[in-house]
Image (cartoon, rainbow, N blue to C red):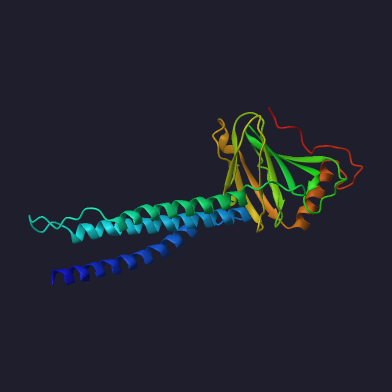
Amino acid sequence: MRLSGMRRSLGRTVALVAVALLGLLSIGVASAQSGQFGGITKEAHDMHRLYVFVLVIAIIVFVIVEGLILFAVIRFRKKSDEMPPQFHGSTLVEMLWTSIPVVIVISLFTYSFIVLRQVDHPPAPNNLTVNVEGFQFQWAFTYTMNELGVHNNPNAKGTFTVTGTAAKEPTLVIPVGEPVEFKLTSHDVIHAFYIREFLYKLDVVPGRDNHFTVTPTQTGTFIGQCAELCGLNHALMRFHVQVVTRADFDKWVAAQAATAGLTGASSTAPAATASPAAPQ
């Protein structure tokens, strides 16, 4: 009788834990979707899926461990001074608590490595390239006329720069659906180039050129900022990111080139910049 009662109690506990696990998994996935932005780039989507994968595994481990603890506390709570049956060692249990963590670690490592390779991929020669310079306390975005992406004219000459000021935050314009390479340099101290919807942040270090590539998947206007405390007016280092269609991007480039005195994609245009170098 006692053995059958233990089995019934164990069965009820396992059923409750299973139901709680399924409920928490659904809540966990929903929380993962709402707790982190899905991102607006191909690379951000990959990183978000990794985040959800890790969170789901963490929830499963938490529920199982806490469920076993609660089961042990309730089932084996003290009822009398009689010593309960003692068990020492179990090859099966030891194999399980060794192999399961190993499988989890290998899974996390493998998936993380795959995502890292997908996100941190080398730039292609025909990518649109934006040179980003951080300085106290704003940003300068430089476009080169013969590095404008898929519609690039290799014979085009010149550059133009969009430089932010304390009174006017700059706008970084990029086309949707095309890989964009950002080359980061610092004019003075360490900054950090951060766009929330990219799910990506990279330090901007004096004397070191950092770069990363993303492919935007949706149009819109987003906010970027410096995410490294860089001085008194650090909070002023904000900028806008505008993702537009290729047609609108070409129109914007033509307008910027005209302002800079360039002739757009003409091969005879002299090298020039639209604005002076970043202020000291």
Is residue 88 rendered to the left or right of residue 216? left
Q: Considering only vertical position in the picture, is 126 above or below 71?
A: above
Marks counted in the figure total 0
Quarter holding residue 100? bottom left
131, 229: nearer the viewer: 131
Q: Is residue 141 above or below residue 87?
A: above
- The answer to which image quadrant residue 228 occupies is top right
> Is residue 37 in sight in this rendering?
no
Residue drawn 19% across the image and 67% down it: 6
Quarter of the image where one finds residue 26: bottom left
**Quadrant the C terminus occupies:** top right
Image location (x, y in percent) of residue 108? 48, 52
Q: Residue furthest front?
A: 91
Q: Does the rendering let one see residue 279?
A: yes
How far across and down, in percent of the image, does residue 28 sit? 42, 60
In which quadrant is the N terminus drawn?
Answer: bottom left
Residue 52: image x %, image y %?
49, 57
Residue 237 pos. (x, y %): 61, 38
In the image, taking residue 155 as reference, residue 174 lies left or right, namely left
Extreme-right residue of the structure: 268
As drawn, is 185 to the left or to the right of 250?
left
Identified at 68% across, 54% down, the residue is 243
> Relative to residue 251, is residue 85 drawn left or right?
left
Residue that extends furthest to the left in the rendered view of this protein: 81
